[in-house]
Image (spheres, rainbow, N blue to C red):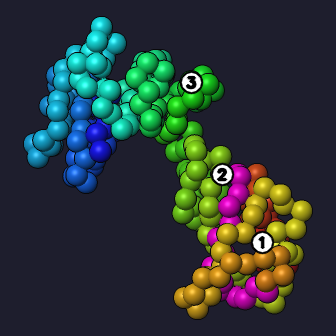
Amino acid sequence: MNFFVIGCGRVGSELAFRLYKTGHTVVVIDINREALNSLPPEFRGRIIEGDVLAEQMLERAGIAEADGLATVTNSDTLNAVVGHMARTLYNVPVIVTRNYDPGMLPVLEAFGCNVVSSTSWGAQRIQELMVDPSFRTVFSAGNGEVEIYETLIPSVWDGKSLGDLLRSNPDCLPVAITRAGRALLPDTETTLQTGDMLNVSATFVGIKALRSLMNAGTEA
């Protein structure tokens, strides 16, 4: 597949090299020559020094053939503009936009691009680990609005139903239970056992409520 990476900082350089190593054709564009020099010497993609907003820059680079574009510069405004151009003018099917300032997140989302907010997601993950590292995030959707968590069922919940644990918590849904190395799809009638590995899909509000309920049962 043919991918464009706009911005060659730490994220852009790493992304471009990862795409290249997995067999994709990669075009990297940055206005800063020193940034482009940060690419690993093994990288054999196309490197373009220049202003991505300059007239016909993207066209000359072959944007019409792109299967996807990631705009990962350190400017939220530039990322939004380039992502919008790629979607509306060149019909690039997959566009991912990096976000720094959480205040700009609604603006970026309004452009209809996939947005990765390292600031928002990173702060949430740090908060989760500081509050209770026993709930481990194994998958994060969007910018962490919904995540899949895993946690061990403590002995105080042995013999109780999953419905008891997730009662009155619409922001927390069961995904799977792993027991003795085998996974099963649970429902509210599933009986919990000590040592079960429970996976749930939840918002931050939902996992906070589940954590409080499990801790209350443990303390009791």
Residue 111 has which mark?
Answer: 3
The answer to whether the residue labelled 1 contacts the one labelled 2, judged by CB atoms less than 8 Å apart, is: no
Residue 122 image offset from top left, x and y in percent: 52, 45
**Neighbour tally class for label 1: few under 14, some 14-19, many 20 plus, Cα within 10 Å:** some
Residue placed most toward the observer, 67 or 7: 67
Q: Amino acid at mark 1?
A: Met
- What is the magenta range? 191-204
**Vertical position of residue 94 compared to residue 200: above or below:** above
Residue 196 has which mark?
Answer: none
Residue 214 has which mark?
Answer: 1
Instruction: Name the element at disc 1.
Output: helix
Q: Amino acid at mark 3?
A: Phe
Residue 165 image offset from top left, x and y in percent: 82, 73
Q: Which residue carries the number 2 mark?
A: 146
Horizontal arrangement in the rendering, residue 59 relative to residue 192 (left or right): left
State the residue at coordinates (55%, 59%): 139
* Residue 95 picture quarter: top left
State the residue at coordinates (28%, 18%): 59
Instruction: Name the element at disc 2.
Output: strand
> Mark 2 or mark 3, which is nearer to you?
3
Let me know if residue 189 is in the magenta part: no
Instruction: Name the element at disc 3.
Output: loop
Measured Cα–Cα span from mark 1 to mark 3: 40 Å
Name which of mark 2 and mark 3 comes first in the sequence: 3
Residue 98 image offset from top left, x and y in percent: 45, 33
Measured Cα–Cα span from mark 2 to mark 3: 21 Å
Horizontal arrangement in the rendering, residue 37 relative to residue 186 (left or right): left
**Vertical position of residue 199 compared to residue 177: above or below:** above
Horizontal arrangement in the rendering, residue 99 relative to residue 204 (left or right): left
